[in-house]
Each structure stands twice: as C-alpha cells, then as structure tokens.
Image (cartoon, rainbow, N blue to C red):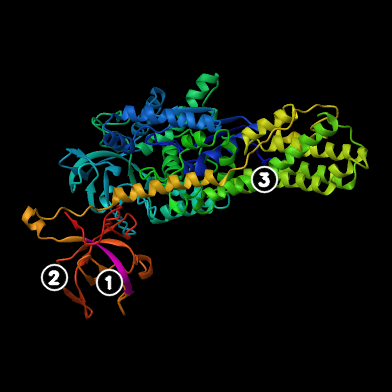
Amino acid sequence: MSTQQNKPSRYTITAALPYTNGPIHIGHLAGVYVPADIYARYLRLTNNDVAFVCGSDEHGVAISMKAKKEGITPKDVIDKYNGIIKKSFQDFGITFDNYSRTSADIHHKTASDFFKTLDEKGEFIEETTAQLYDEEAKQFLADRFVIGTCPKCGHEEAYGDQCENCGSSLNATDLINPKSTITGAVPTLKETKHWFLPLDKHEDFLKEWILEGHKKDWKPNVYGQCKSWIDDGLKPRAVTRDLNWGIPVPVEGGEGKVLYVWFDAPIGYISSTKEWAAREGKDWEPYWKSEDTKMVHFIGKDNIVFHCIIFPAILKAHGGYILPENVPANEFLNLEGNKLSTSKNWAVWLHEYLEEFPNMQDVLRYTLTANAPETKDNDFTWKDFQARNNNELVAIFGNFVNRVAVLTHKYYDGVIPESAEFTEVDLAALAEVKKYPEIISSSIERYRFREAGQELMNLARLGNKYLADEEPWKRIKTDEERVKTIMYVALQIAAGLAVLSEPFLPFTSTKLKGILQLDALSWNDVADKEVLLASNHKINKAELLFRKIEDKEVQAQLDKLEATKKANENANKEIVPQKDTITFEDFSKLDMRVGTIIEAEKMPKAKKLLVLKVDTGLDTRTIVSGIAESFKPEEIIGKKVTVLVNLAPRALRGVESEGMILMNQNTEGKLVFVNPDEDGVVNGNQIS
C-alpha cells in the first residue's frame, strides 16, 4: 500500500456547490461528483479521517433569472431544486459527510464574518465605477442579466461574466453590443459603488504557490489556465453586486447590494464543514486550518480560476487558513456529440435516470468513470453506455462472480472447500490479487480515476482467465481435489473484487459482499491478509449483479433526445412576420388546384431547379420548381401536389414555367409538399 512521505492527519474534500436553478445531470456527475466520491470512499477504506462536504449554491443571478422566468420567488426555486438535487445524490450513493445550503443561517454568518474581517484589515478597495443599467427594468444588470458579443472570439451570445464558447472570463462592460436579458433593452452606463479584491496585490504569492509550487503535481489544464491568468496580470475583482437576492453586504454603505456569489459560494465549503462538525461533536478548525490536513477541491474546468486564484487569495488575505493541495478539475462531458445544456434540456438528468433505470446506479457510475473527461472534453453516448454494461460489467465482472457462486453451490452446497496444494498458476493468481490494492491506489492518488476503474476491471479479467484456463467444470469429473483448490482461489479473487470495487461500484460491492457473506475488510486487507474467505465458510446463492441492456431501452433514450432537439429547433425557429392584410377579393383571384407530378428531371447546370410535368386536371403543363436540394426527381413522380395554376407564365433558364407548386419547410430546413393527400381528392379539384 503506497503512502505519502508525510501522511496527512485528515482530509478535507470539497465538491463544487451545484446551482439550484436546475437538477443534476451527467456532466456534473462526470466532472465533479463521481470522482470526488470515488476518492472519499477510497480514503475511508484506507482508514483515513475524511470530511467530504458540499451543498446547494442558492444565491446569484442564475437563481434570480430562473425565478423571473417561472414567475415565482427565488426561495421557491431553491427549495424545489435543493430537494431534487439532494435526493438524487442520496439515491445515487454520493457519500457526502455533509450537504448544506448557502441560504442557511450558518453560511450567511460565516460569509458575512469573512467579508467584515477582510474589510477591517483593509483588504478591499472601494470604487465607484460605471456599470450596465437597464432603464426599463430600473436595475443594475448583474453578469448573467447581460448578453452580447465576446470581444475575444466573436461569439454573439456571451454572458457578462464568461463566454461559454471560448471559456474567457469577462466583465459585463467588455461585451460588444450588450443587451439586457430582462427586457431586451440596450443598457446604459450608470455609476455605482462596489468593493473589490485587489488580486494584483496577491500576484507574487500566487506565482510562487501555483507556478512554482504546483508545476509538477497539478493537471496541465488547471496549471495552464492559472498560468495564463497570472501571466496576463491580475486585476482587482468585484466581490459585491447590485442585487436583491443573496447575502447583504454587511458594512456601512452596502445597502441594496449583496456579496458576489463567487465570494460567498466557496466559503460555503467552510460553513458546510462547520455544520457537519457541530452535528458530529467535532472541532471544524483542523479541517481548514491545520497544516497536516490535505485539502482537495473537485470542480469542473469552468471553475478553475475561482478555486485556484480567487478563493486562495481570499483565504490568504483572511489569514489562518490552509490552501488546497490539489484541484483536479475535469474538462466537459458532451452528450451524443453536442454540448450539455440545462436551458436547452440537452442532458441526461440524474433523477430521471434513476427512475428509468432502477437499481442501476453503478452502470452509470462505471460508464462515466470509464469515459471521464479527465484531460480533454469527452462524449457520452447511449450506445457506449449499453456496450460498457453488456460487454464489461455483465460479460466480465458479473460473469466471473456468477460462475464462482453457482459452481460453489453446485459442488459444495455453498461451503468454501479446503484447498489442496497450490500450483504455480494458483500462487501466481493469488499474488496478482495482492498487487491490485497498490495498483489501484496509485491511480486514485494521482486522480486518474478512469485508469483506476479499468484496473479494477482487469482484476475481474484475471478471475475470468483463471477459471477459463483451469476449467473446473471439466476437471470435476476427473480430479475433485484439484477443483477444490481452483474454487478456493477463485473465491479469494471474488473477495478481492468485493472490497476493491466499493469506491467505483458501491451498490455492486454491497451485493457481492452479501453473496459472499464477507466480513468487514479494509483496502489493505486485500494485500496483507493471507486468507480473505476461509475454508468451511458458507456463501449465499448466486444472484445477477448486472442485467443486459436491450436495444429498445437505448432507442427510447435516443428518441427522447431527438424530441428535445426538435423542440429546441421549433422554439428557435424564426417565424416569418405576417404580410400585409388582403381582401377576400384579392384571395379569390388565386386559383389553386390539385395536381399530380407525372414527369420530373433536373434542370441542366442548375443546382436548385427541377423541371416538372404536372397533370392539373385542366391540362398537363410544365412547372419549374426550386426543390432539387430536397427531392430527387424519381422520388416525386406520382406525388399529389397543390398548384397555383393562374400564375402568369415566367421563363426560367429558357424554360417557360406555367404555375407554382406550394411548399413548406420543416424544422430541419427541408422542403415538404403542402399535400392534398386525403382519399377522394382528384386532379383539378379547386382549393378554397
């Protein structure tokens, strides 16, 4: 078992506080909560003192925007989504020691006290600056109430704090052509006073701490983003906002202002730890103030700057607090090739997954770990989810365990047999099992959870290969004593899997321990104990750890996403404004008839035009129609169509067109016929 030179006395693990403006989706899980939970579970299994804290982030503009959109109060929003999020985490098996809320009294007091301490120490700059103001709404526009063109990449829908296209951090006044998301008005500039944290004052400390101190042990994406910010020169950053939802600025002159959410939210880790310690009868301070504590922040890449530059600067300015030893931020997870989006409902929502795939938490945990965006953006697809389950969890892990349990009951009524003398193959397999705690630990301690999960699966592969090579189902007919040893060894491998799978597949681990009737074993026991399951110990009957996922289940999820895509297209489709009003007499001049296309061919050297022969019931006439990009000529012969027959003839590329086919356009931009396709409709019928 690997240990650090100076083993920490305790660990403080934080997971990014989710905004309570929507439920949890798979991007949140892959980026933050699954790796954080794997790490916390592993540390507990290795007998460490762990405080794993999180909580709902219930302030800031996102909450206000949601409340305005739904016509409810911010309190209604946070109560609704806090309930959904908290239950989803519990049902999914995320083992927070404490899950708090930033609306809690203990957090308001902790954040207010932080602000007052920094203010009394003279750590803030008070400045009156020009901020964007919506004259129609009569309010200053906080970051997310402004949208405009990013000055760095030209993306036309950048927010006032960040461009989600290029990832640049912005100020609202940086935007080109800004507009208010409340009224759509072009904002004006109006002066207002705010408190600023002078990050430039802490630049030397941050250079030394990050760029020199963590050059070798922080992930390249984290180190690179921090270096870019520091190299560009740090500037004062506002820590207050003109809003009516949040923690009131607790000093004179702060009326009508609140603490900026990125000042208050990270302090939520501290208040959550305080809440946990008070409940458990512990002292919270060592978890935040002792040098022998190791602190790790689990976040997504959009939060790197706040956790690696701004929050450490706040803690340093306050004094007395330790800084994180690592911030293993992940990149983003996409869904079926497109960026996850709460506002566009392009997501796999955790609470819906738990309903649609009951008792299959570990399948999602495993897939998200195996496909984790640890070094680059990655893609979740339902086909990969199915393949990971069927080809790995079912066919490798589940198959091995099931064969071991079934054969033990078939041959020995579930009682573990006495082993005879071990062969070299047996000894090699048992020795290999003992290596896996160290192998998996090494990956976890370097925050390579994807690699660690695959090493766990390699242990299951070892078990499968051992059984396949030794073939106890054949040998039982000729060498019963040998089979006893084979089954004994296979059961030791299964016991190792039961323990080492717990951080990755906690529900499966519990079920497997139940099958094996396994006593409590620690991580180190797998390497150190000679015997994990003793002879004459009785195990329970086999039960399937995983079930196959059928094609129809995957298709149902793909259909659900397709419906979302079409709903978004319809919502975003620009409706052509109504034309000028006409009289009935104007309309009655139009002569529209049912017709049938009897010939169709492409117009030479014309990309969009087809030359059609149409039976209108009155005659057969030539009509040139711009539909070649949507239809092949052979597809539309025999098609009934609506024809405007009294349109004045017009020459198109030398061909006289005598009428017009009526068309529409679907959500994908493809032309479709306005069809008179009911039974009994014949050519020549008038349309009125």
Q: Residues within 10 Å of mark 1 (few under 14, many from 20)?
A: some
Measure the alpha-carbon separation of dots 1 and 3. Answer: 74 Å
Q: Residues within 10 Å of mark 2 (few under 14, many from 20)?
A: few
Amino acid type assigned to the residue bearing label 3 in the image: Ser
Q: Earlier in the sequence, mark 1 or mark 3?
A: 3
* Residue 386 or residue 229, whichever sits in front: 386
Amino acid type assigned to the residue bearing label 2 in the image: Ala
Could you tell me residue 168's position as x and y percent?
Answer: 37, 53
Q: Residue at x 20, y 38 (%)?
A: 139
Q: Residue at x 51, y 24 (%)?
A: 276
Left or right placement of residue 566 versus residue 351 in this view: left
Measure the alpha-carbon separation of dots 1 and 2. Answer: 17 Å
Q: Is residue 607 visible?
A: yes
Compared to residue 221, the image places residue 48 above or below, namely: above
Q: How many marks?
A: 3
Q: Residue at x 56, y 50 (%)?
A: 384
Q: Quarter holding the N terminus?
A: top right
Residue beneath disc 3: 442
Q: Residues within 10 Å of mark 3 (few under 14, many from 20)?
A: some
Q: Earlier in the sequence, mark 3 or mark 2?
A: 3
* Residue 632 or residue 121, whichever sits in front: 632
Q: Quarter holding the C terminus?
A: bottom left
Secondary element under disc 1, as helix, strand or loop, is strand
Displayed quadrant of residue 644: bottom left
Residue beneath disc 2: 648
Contact (CB < 8 A) between labels 1 and 2? no
User: What range is drawn magenta here?
Assistant: 594-601
Residue beneath disc 1: 613
